[in-house]
Amino acid sequence: MTDLTRLSAADLSILLTSGAVSSVEATQAHLDHIAAVDTDVHAFLHVAGANALAAAAVVDAQRAAGAVLGPLAGVPIAIKDVLATRDMPSTAGSKILEGWIPPYDATVVRLVREAGLIPLGKTNMDEFAMGSSTEFSAYGPTHNPWDLDRIPGGSGGGSAAAVSAFEAPLALGSDTGGSIRQPAAVTGSVGVKPTYGGVSRYGAIALASSLDQVGPVSRTVYDAALLHDVLSGHDPLDSTSLTDRWPSMAAAAIAGRVDGALTGVRIGVVKELSGPGFQPGVLQRFNETLAMLVAAGAEIEEVSAPSFEYAVAAYYLILPAEASSNLARFDSVRFGIRVDPAEGPLTSERVMAATRDAGFGPEVKRRIILGTYALSAGYYDAYYGSAQKVRTLIQRDFDAAFEKVDVLLSPSAPTTAFKFGEKMDDPMAMYLNDVTTIPANLAGIPGMSLPMGLAPEDGLPVGLQVMAPAKQDARLYTFGAAVEQLLEAHWGHTLLSLAPKLAPTQMFASEGGAV
Amino acid sequence: MSEITAEQVAHLANLARIDLSPEEITRLTAELGQIVDSVAKVAEVATPEVPATSHPMPLTNVFRADVVVPSLSVEEALSGSTDRDGDKFRVPAILDEE
Amino acid sequence: MKKAELMDYDKALELFEPVLGFEVHVELNTKTKMFCGCANEFGQGANTNTCPTCLGLPGGLPQVNAKAIESSIRLGLALGCEIAEYSRFARKNYFYPDTAKNFQTSQYDEPIAFNGQLTIELESGRQVTIDIERAHMEDDAGKLTHVGGATGRIQGADYSLVDYNRGGVPLVEIVTQMIEGGEADSPEIGRTYVAAIREIVKALGVSNARMEEGNVRCDANVSLRPRGSGKLGTRTETKNVNSLRSVERAVRYEIQRQAALLAAGGTITQETRHWHEDTGITSAGRPKSDADDYRYFPEPDLVPVAPSRAWVEELRATLPEPPAARRKRLQADWGFANLEFQDVVNSDLLDAVEATVAAGASAQSSRKWWTGEVARLANVAGVSADSLVEPVQLAALIELVTAGTLTDRLARQVLEGVIAGEGTPLEVVEIRGLAVVSDDGPLIEAIDLALASQPDVLAKIRDGKVQAAGAVIGAVMKAMRGQADAARVRELVLERAGTAE
């Protein structure tokens, strides 16, 4: 029998629709695989188990009753722990929220449930999405399925590892400065950050409100498109949600698979995002991909985005500033843990301060203090105010570039997956890891990462980042599907089929929450 | 080099309501200094004529009709609290009014 | 609480010039909260009107109430303000247990309304124009109850309880410019200004405007400038002064307190102060410090408010007659003396009297009933007079008195019946059988009986000592248990005395 966990969401959907496979069977297969490999991978903080099977049984019953179901009905999905779920703990990888079960579902979680997808559990992440490696998760890091001694990227390393370890065909991620795209790159999977406002943020535990965006994580471009179609649309609960009617991303992806889809496509290569500081093998695969695109009829032009040099600096002012305010609500009163001071009087002020000291990890504290500094009287103009101006300049650079080209390309990350601990003691080195992905967040434009091979020097996945103008998410899918088809035709297989097979372990992931 | 001092970090920690240990303050003072040095370069290009962008998508006037929607139940509202008294949240003594 | 040294008020004014400033918070009476769809109402049990947004749960996001924007613009216009073409919300960051998000969503340098003016008239007839700096929108905090300790106050409490029902209720904060030249009238200026704001928000219908329920709250800033000095003094901000009389008292108290302190060579600390309604004093709160670094920045979860000029003009057209102009008009229409009119205004019964007159009653009798019997009953019940009875019912009652169906005394009983929910005045008259006895038969019988039992009185009446009739009238009214028209009884007594044998 087919290993149901190796199928794409689209292929699984065909089996589910035809009745060849039930959702309960598909869900059970994934739960079994999670039980077998997640002790090593640690992609999940919580596995839904019984609830997942119950939801699958409901979908099976609906299908048996002849209900018209969406294309992803019955397909399992992993949910990043940054999203509020009313039946599962939602900790955002932080100790301060240990065990918290929200009394509501995030809008995207509601949409996913309504579309009949089966939540398998919650995936690991850097605490409050602050990090590029999951090493800042309060519950221990996730391991890269390609090499368990390496990081899976971050903050959404859990979601990326879950799909690349075949624990789930789909996952939800959130991307503030690359947290969907960079993990996709280093795990050989696909991840998309939609246009800001394209997907609701309601119920996504906020990191930086003006940068955060929820998006799909998958193994194929088409699967990401199918999930994107479920997620996108106006949500009145999110005041920054766009009211635009979105074209079908799935249709856009299909359009990318027709012959000649790349002919005449104008591609811009951002000079500032592929130079020194990039791993040679990353640049090699990038240049080879560009050559193949030219051979397929695309036109390539180098574009300059001079303000990108300031993007990381602006990002590490805006993000901490907004985060310092967004994270103020974690005060022990209405939710989350409470820690009393070791000595001295028990006052509200002191309990809050002790709780936040004990509940927040080092990176969160670092960024809260930095953000508090950037917003404080006398510094606002020089730091936060200036950073907001850099944002304008970056938008202008993108506008100028998109006057000339249809899509912009760069490597998704400067390096392949690094080893645990390599950058833990050097915050700036960790921050520079996001240099490629940050500009899209600052400008609000959509971006995708898809695999473009393995770096020759370490045999680890390399990601290609595609960026399109704001609201042109469909273009990402058409172009991305075309590139994916081109590369897979060249390789003769998918990239993930090369990933080492994970040996089942005797231990089972716990169902009761964080392990 | 930046002029971040330990006193400043202690003050910021107080504003941010985090009871940092002396060791944390020392470490953060050094780290913050480095980070601030490297992010301060935003001021180089942030000239007066450049407008600030606080929202990536330029929307205005997004309003909600004044229509009541169901609230959480009291039990749902209090479900996450560590300390309650009846239907209210309980907090330790407060030093003084805001 | 120790009472501070106070300087004699007149002496204080000889030495110092008071400079004032007010921040008035108005709670809007929208159906829902400022940033979420929870009901804007209290009294249904703690934490019944909360959601992830107003409870500050992780993942909650704000959505702006259109009606609150509309009310804020109308209020701004009524205060003579300009309405911003581009206005933004900002986060004011500070930790406090009643503030669910640990920031208040407010407005900073881009308020919805600014540069207004309001002219108030003092009892002396002096007109004072108050410059309004700004009116901005923000959300209210939850309600704290302090438990333990001696006083129920925050100081000395063992712990506090939080109810977030009020958290997120829309507020407009109206901030004045510095008010100079108030001189000895300063306390009255404070009271009259807050009264004027209250009257305006009530006339606009944007707030329930009940100070006792915190719908209108005043922070009073007071500083003193030594005569002949160009330099402003240090100011104090007395928080949450929640009645008109208290505003006046608090300003007066601060003038006297600061004057005594300054004259003794002391200095004023820039601080917030608490007003104590019971003892009529202020006490030191938290001093201003660098902990007041609120780290304002534009609220990234909300987009700018840019009201079109067409919308603003549309809203301007909905403004009611300004309360001051309306008062002038009503006093002239009703022909009330100043004292009579003030009585109505101070009792907050202008609307009630106007509605009663509109329902057909005369202005004078409307005034007498509202400020008299209705106010008395309301006072006993501890509620506001206008909540006790509908103006149209009172008009109907007055009509019954005018027609002679009821005496004043009977009408008071009928009023009680109406208030008790027994029905309309006419229905109460029927149910209780309270109408004046208009058939003379029983009256004459009672009069004859009374005259017969008091032959000396009868003799006096016959001798032309008409005032002696009082004793008989009293006896008759008693016999009729009050259900007779005293004037008619008098007529009949004189008549019967003349013919009696």
Image (cartoon, coloured by chain):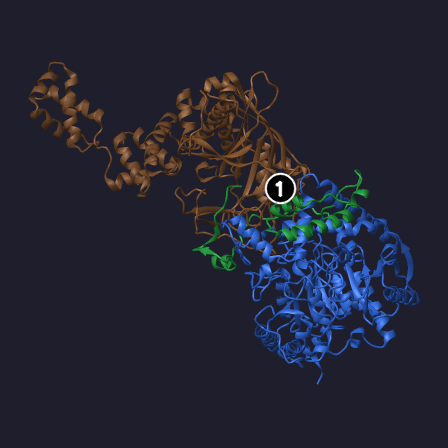
User: Which quadrant holds the N terminus of chain A?
Assistant: bottom right
Q: Which chain is brown?
A: C
Q: Residue C472, image x and y in percent? A: 14, 24
The amino acid marked with disc number 1 is: Tyr
Q: Quadrant of residue A94?
A: bottom right
Q: Does A100 sit left or right of A478 as displayed?
A: left
- Is residue C385 toward the left or the right of residue C445 in the image? right
Q: Taking the image as drawn, is residue A246 in sight?
A: yes
Q: Residue at x 78, y 74 (%)?
A: A496
The residue depicted at 64 percent of the width and 74 percent of the height is: A74
Residue at 83% over, 72% down = A459
Res A240 seen here? no
The image quadrant where one finds the C terminus of chain A is: bottom right
Q: Chain of mark 1?
A: C
The residue where tag 1 is placed is C294
Residue C338 position in % (x across, y down): 42, 20
Q: Secondary structure at mark 1?
A: loop
In this view, C496 is above or below A45 = above
Q: Which chain is blue?
A: A
**Number of residues whose C-alpha sits closer than 10 Å to that of mark 1, classed few (under 14), some (14–19) or many (20 or more):** some
Q: In front: A117, or C273?
A: C273
Question: Which quadrant of the view contains residue A430?
Answer: bottom right
Residue C360 locus on image (x, y percent)? 39, 31
Q: Position of residue C470 (x, y in %)?
A: 16, 22
Where A186 falls versus C391 (above or below)? Answer: below
Above or below: residue C63 compared with residue A409: above
Chain B rendered in what hue?
green
